[in-house]
């Protein structure tokens, strides 16, 4: 009788231990699987972040190389020279730009030239150009006053700058619905010069160009 109780107790103990071992094994297995899945997910996230960082780095390098190439293509600069009777205005511009002089306006007393990368589109008030050059037989104040309404509406921001030691007016903003850029206006003798770029894309070229402006006083 005692022997049967001992055997029954031993069997129950062994069964309990077996059940506990099974649960522990299942728990360890489940934890291992959970850890592996988390590791795989973390690895995927890390790989994605690394791949994105590599792509961003490559894109940044490509953009820099393209910008450097574009800058090198513009060098060396060419020199623009206006007519002697209009003060012989000169400045350096990128060699990748083309120049068109509107002879019709010159005959009417106003000298106009247009500069643009590769080719110059047909002349139009709504067309954007890298640079417009206008030398008008008008008083400086009259030309400045023609932009007064746009300045008052805050479409244009007005400031002063220096061109070859002469005080000039710099206008930045929207000149029309189609044109948003920068203009610099200054006097040459009895004439008034307006240099204008029609897009922020050419801001750096425009400011660099202004630094080379020269004319006969």
Image: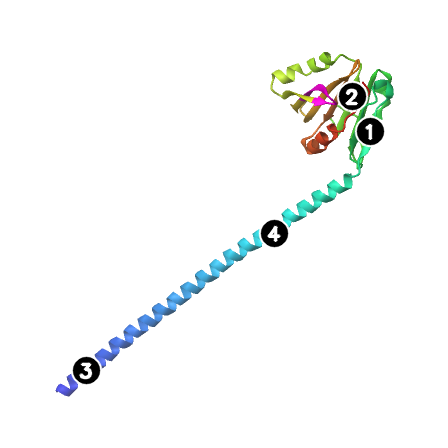
Q: How many angstroms separate mark 2 from mark 4 (CA)?
A: 46 Å
Q: Earlier in the sequence, mark 3 or mark 4?
A: 3
| Relative side of 50 to 14, left or right | right
Residue 25 lies within the magenta run: no
- Dot 2 lies on which element? strand
Q: How many angstroms separate mark 2 from mark 3 (CA)?
A: 112 Å
Query: In this picture, is 43 found above or below 126?
Result: below
Q: Which of marks 4 and 1 is nearer the N terminus?
A: 4
Q: Residue 155 in the image: state x and y as whole percent.
A: 62, 21
Residues in magenta, as a range: 162-170
**Viewer-side residue, 183 vs 212:** 212
Q: Residue 97 in the image: state x and y as whole percent.
A: 79, 34
Query: In this picture, is 67 found above or below 35?
Result: above
- Dot 1 lies on which element? strand
Instruction: From the image, tell me which residue sits under label 1.
Output: 80
Q: How many angstroms separate mark 3 from mark 1 (CA)?
A: 111 Å
- Counting other residues with Cα less than 10 Å from the Cα at mark 3, is it few (<14), some (14-19), or many (20 or more)? few
Q: Nearer the viewer, mark 2 or mark 1?
A: 1
Q: Do the residues labelled 4 and 1 touch (CB within 8 Å)?
A: no
Residue at image position (22%, 78%) is 13
Instruction: From the image, tell me which residue sits under label 2.
Output: 134
Instruction: From the image, tell me which residue sits under label 3.
Output: 8
- Counting other residues with Cα less than 10 Å from the Cα at mark 2, is it few (<14), some (14-19), or many (20 or more)? many
Q: Which of marks 2 and 1 is nearer the N terminus?
A: 1
- Counting other residues with Cα less than 10 Å from the Cα at mark 4, is it few (<14), some (14-19), or many (20 or more)? few
Q: How many angstroms separate mark 4 from mark 1 (CA)?
A: 42 Å
Q: Earlier in the sequence, mark 2 or mark 3?
A: 3
């Amino acid at each position: 009788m005692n022997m049967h109780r001992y055997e029954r107790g031993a069997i129950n103990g062994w069964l309990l231990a077996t059940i506990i071992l099974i649960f522990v094994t299942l728990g360890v297995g489940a934890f291992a699987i959970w850890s592996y899945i988390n590791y795989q997910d973390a690895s995927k996230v890390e790989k994605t972040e690394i791949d994105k960082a590599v792509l961003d780095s490559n894109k940044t390098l490509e953009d820099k190389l393209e910008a450097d190439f574009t800058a090198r293509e513009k060098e060396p600069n060419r020199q623009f020279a206006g007519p002697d009777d209009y003060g012989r205005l000169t400045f350096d511009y990128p060699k990748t730009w083309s120049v068109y002089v509107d002879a019709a306006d010159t005959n009417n007393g106003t000298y106009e030239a247009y500069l643009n990368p590769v080719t110059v589109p047909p002349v139009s008030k709504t067309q954007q150009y890298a640079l417009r050059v206008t030398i008008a037989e008008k008083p400086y104040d009259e030309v400045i006053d023609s932009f007064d309404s746009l300045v008052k509406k805050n479409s244009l921001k007005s400031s002063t700058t220096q061109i070859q030691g002469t005080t000039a007016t710099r206008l930045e903003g929207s000149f029309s619905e189609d044109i948003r850029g920068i203009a610099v206006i200054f006097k040459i003798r009895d004439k008034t010069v307006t240099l204008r770029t029609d897009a922020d894309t050419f801001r750096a070229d425009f400011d660099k160009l202004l630094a080379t402006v020269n004319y006969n006083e």
